[in-house]
Image (spheres, grey):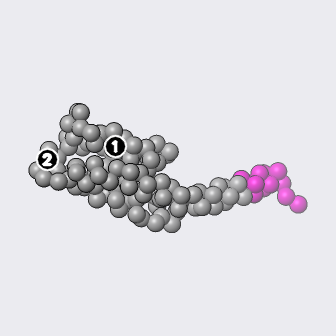
Amino acid sequence: METPEQRAERIFKEDEEKWEEEQIQQLPFRRLKRIAVLKKHREILDASIVGKQKGIRFRKFFYSYVNMVAQKVFESEDQEYSYVGKAGRLRYTDNEELMGAYKKGDPMLPVIGEIIHEFGCFDY
């Protein structure tokens, strides 16, 4: 016969497994969401890396990183988190890097905010 502690542990484990399964099922939908936001802003993203501009190295890094993350098929939520991360923790979301590459009134700043939000940086 099962003790109350064993029962609670079993129920907790079952709930955790269900939650992990739901998260795995959500991975393709989140990927489609990331691809959609990049398609929406494709024109301004492409324009941000053309020519000699302030912070061009970071601009090119940001451009290639968000394209890579949007296209990547993640196998687990932990893997997705390691690429998307929390806002401000990875280089592509670092405020100092962003302010160094984009001027205050740059039309890319709202786009970056939307990308960071839609990629799920604020979900963690």
The reply to whether the magenta stretch includes residue 89 is no
- The picture places residue 70, in percent across and down from the top left corner, at 40, 59
The amino acid on which the numbered mark 2 sits, given as a three-letter code, is Gln
- The picture places residue 46, in percent across and down from the top left corner, at 25, 54
Side (left or right) of 23 relative to 55? right
The reply to whether the magenta stretch includes residue 3 is yes
Report the magenta residues as a range.
1-13
Task: Tell me the quarter of the picture where residue 114 sits.
Answer: top left
Most distant residue in the left direction: 52
Rate crowding at label 2 as few (under 14), some (14 to 19) or many (20 or more) other CA atoms within 10 Å.
few
Most distant residue in the right direction: 1
Q: Circle 2 sits on which residue? A: 53
Cα–Cα span, label 2 and label 1: 17 Å
The tag earlier along the polypeptide, 2 or 1, is 2
The amino acid on which the numbered mark 1 sits, given as a three-letter code, is Val
Please tell me how many numbered marks the rendered image carries.
Answer: 2
Report helix, strand or loop for mark 2: loop
Q: Circle 1 sits on which residue? A: 111
- The picture places residue 97, in percent across and down from the top left corner, at 24, 43
Q: In which quadrant of the rendered image does the N terminus lie?
A: bottom right
Residue visible at 83% across and 54% down in the picture: 3
Most distant residue in the top direction: 104
Residue visible at 44% across and 47% down in the picture: 118
Looking at the magenta stretch, what is its main secondary structure?
Answer: helix
Question: From where the camera sits, is residue 111 visible?
Answer: yes
Residue visible at 82% across and 51% down in the picture: 4
Residue visible at 60% across and 61% down in the picture: 25
Report helix, strand or loop for mark 1: helix
